[in-house]
Image (tube, grey):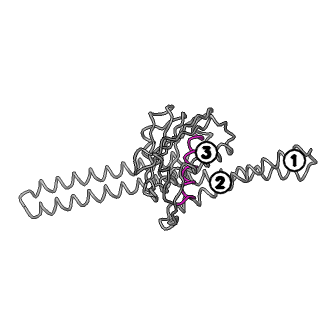
Amino acid sequence: MRISSRRGTIVFFLCLGIGLVALAVALNVGWIILNWREGVLLFFGIVFFALIIAGMVVNTIFLVRELRRSEQHDSFINAVTHELKTPVASIRLHLETLQRRELPETQKQDFYRLMLSDTDRLTETVEQVLRAGRAGDKKAGREKTEVDFAQLVRDCMEATRARYHLQPEALRYEEASSNGDGLRVRGSAEDLRTAVSNVLDNAIKYSGETVDVRVLLEAPDDDRIVLRVQDQGVGISPDDMKRIFKRFYRVTHRSLAHVKGTGLGLFIVKAIALKHGGKVFAESDGEGQGTTIILELPRFAA
């Protein structure tokens, strides 16, 4: 209901802006026709008219952007609230059960395992929000060292396999020839690990029922290292392609209702890439055609 209400508000203000522009045009054209002989008045009238139109256009654009940002912010709050509330409720339920009933040891161990999993989920949500704030801080993460990016990617893949209980063939690694110089970058190992982990998590979450992710790391020239993470999942529409790296933005589709998240993952990846002098972008042939996230970083030459 809230999203529909906001969309209605946007439509209303768009129509209002268009109506005001049309009224201004009609009044100004009429005024010019009536005073066409007065050259000075005509000149100032045209200038005044242009300023009015420009002001209306800028105001309308600003209003639409603020409404869209507010809508995304509300979606983020709802997502974070859900990500925090669900595991807390689960942990409470298991604790109450343990408190009130005498359970077999095996069932107790299952409850402990589930509560630890919920705790990890809570921790990850909080850390994701903190990473987003840190990624937006240009002063943070300035401490840069030489990083073996190939090893970092492999470590992230192992951690991701363990987190999602994946078989090795579900998350495959390929490495192109590095011309004997190594695949190294200069930067913050912590930030780079965060970026790679977010890209891998994103690929797995949007893979659908069958996870089939290919990770390719290559150095196409002496200046760049390119990481490609390709999934065979739900894909991205052309409209969403332009916005997936924005803060709080999440792709909305009925088939993605089960996908949980805060809409910060790819925003963090982009911020870290820019901080390291690189870039990130996505490729997809459309919905149902899979997605490839490409992260490019400057190559470090010892």
Q: Amino acid at mark 2?
A: Glu
- x 62%, y 53%: residue: 80
Of labels 2 and 1, earlier in sequence is: 1
- Is label 1 in a helix, a strand or a loop? helix
> In the image shown, does 153 or 286 lie closer to the viewer?
153
Of labels 2 and 3, earlier in sequence is: 2
Mark 2, Cα crowd under 10 Å, few <14 / some 14-19 / many 20+, is few
- x 52%, y 62%: residue: 145
Q: For marks 1 and 3, give the CA distance.
A: 31 Å
Callout 2–callout 3 Cβ contact below 8 Å: no
| Residue 13 is one of the magenta-drawn residues | no
Pinpoint residue 56: horizontal percent, then vertical percent: 31, 57
Name the residue at the right extreme: 102
Residue denoted by label 2 = 124
Q: Amino acid at mark 1?
A: Lys
Q: Dividing the picture into quarters, in which one does residue 167 lie?
A: top right
211 relative to 38, above or below: above
Residue denoted by label 1 = 108
Residue denoted by label 3 = 157
- Is label 3 in a helix, a strand or a loop? helix
**Part of the protein shown in magenta:** 188-205
> In the image shown, does 227 or 63 lie closer to the viewer?
227
- x 22%, y 58%: residue: 50
Of labels 1 and 3, earlier in sequence is: 1
- x 65%, y 42%: residue: 161
> In the image shown, does 75 or 158 lie closer to the viewer?
158
Mark 3, Cα crowd under 10 Å, few <14 / some 14-19 / many 20+, is many
